[in-house]
Amino acid sequence: MDKHSKTTCDNITIKISGKEMPISEEMKVHHWQVEKESAAAEEELLEQPFVTSASTDSSNEKLETFKRIHYVPPKKKKVNFLLGNRHEMLTGFLLSWKAAVTAIVIGLIFGFVMLKIAIYPGDFFAEQAVKKEKVVQHKKEENGTPTPQQTAAIQSMSVAVVQGGVFSSAEAAETTASVVKGKGLPAMVVEMNGQYYLYMIGAENLETAKELGDKIAAQNVEVYAKELAIAEKNIQVETKAEAEFLQLTHSLFLTMLEVETAGYFKRPINQEKLTAIEEKINKIKNIDQIKNKGIKSLQTEQLKSYQAFKQYLEAKTETEWIAAQQAQLNYLKQLISL
């Protein structure tokens, strides 16, 4: 049916059963396209989010619609399900590789140590002890100090002496020594193997000791000459200086004793030996890092004996000779007691 205006509709008459029927209202016009657009609008309204009604009644007020303004949706990462993100995969691979290598290295080291301990436990712990000892020794040597276990050897020697007797008690030996000293003779008591020995004179050899013994016997003192053997000794040292001193002291004592007896019998003194004595004593004087009390006492006695020796060479009297002999005996006693 075509659309008609209101003016056109007023000129139309309708007859039903021959009777003319008046038109009392406007004819409703339905258009298919309008109905379709109305239905589409209703669907669009249902699909829109964030729609609210201005009022809850059935009035024809306009509905307000809230829409997103300037909304930019996030970009979706294109994921390759076969390779994924290459950077993330590479980083993960490197981290996994490092962790695996570290774990393998630690495992090999730990396994080797445990295997060595299990198979050779004694060798392993002994090796560790040796390494530790070497480290300690290296640190101490840097400070000029050897390890506490280090020893220095005093070579064995034989000394010709004039002996005044052997006693079972220290009291008897000291009483006899006092009598000998009262006659102006040197005397020294030393304990060895539970017995007490009285020594009076030291000499360069046994023949010289016998000659000296005959002079002492003339003063109604019972004596005899003998060789006193002193075995090699390993002395525990704390410093290198102590070991150096022990290497010098042995030969110095014997050389001084030889020069003394030569002077007593008015024999010519070997100047080379006298020079050697001076060189060694100067070295001993400069050694000041001696901590061992026994070695320190030995050094003190040797310096005293040198002073008495020097005084004897200058004076060459019987009294100075006796004093030099007494100093040598005191040194010998300290050497034996080490």
Image (cartoon, grey):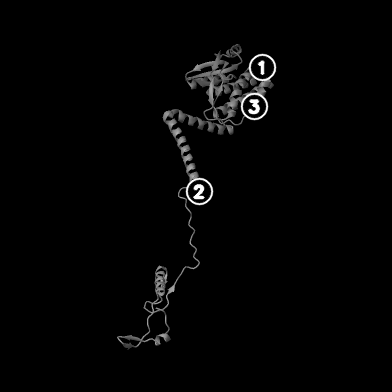
Instruction: Give neighbour class at mark 2: few <14, some 14-19, many 20+ (Cα, 10 Å).
Output: few
Residue tagged by mark 3?
283
Rendered view: 279 above or below 39: above
Of marks 2 and 3, the one in the foreground: 2
Residue at x 54% of width, y 31% of height: 137
Could you tell whether 258 is left or right of 33 in the image? right
Q: Earlier in the sequence, mark 1 or mark 3?
A: 1
Q: Which residue is pictured at 33% across the width and 88% down the height?
A: 20
> Dot 1 corresponds to which residue?
263
Which three-letter amino acid code belongs to the residue tagged 2?
A: Arg
Would you say residue 143 is visible in this rendering?
no
Q: Nearer the viewer, mark 1 or mark 2?
A: 2
Q: How far apart are marks 2 and 3 (CA)?
A: 79 Å
Quick check: 59 left or right of 321? Answer: left
Q: Which one is in front, 253 or 251?
A: 251
Q: Are marks 1 and 2 in contact (CB under 8 Å)?
A: no
Give neighbour class at mark 1: few <14, some 14-19, many 20+ (Cα, 10 Å).
some
For the N terminus, the image quarter is: bottom left
Helix, strand or loop status at disc 1? helix
Using the numbered discs, state the Cα–Cα distance from disc 1 to disc 3 in whole angstroms.
25 Å
Q: Compare marks 2 and 3 and give the one earlier in the sequence.
A: 2
Question: Residue 134: where, in percent of width, then height?
Answer: 53, 31
Q: Which of 174 and 192 is in front in this view?
A: 192
Secondary structure at badge 3 equals helix
| Residue at 48% over, 39% down | 101
Classify residue 115 by image quadrant: top left
Q: Count the marks.
A: 3
The residue tagged 2 is: 86
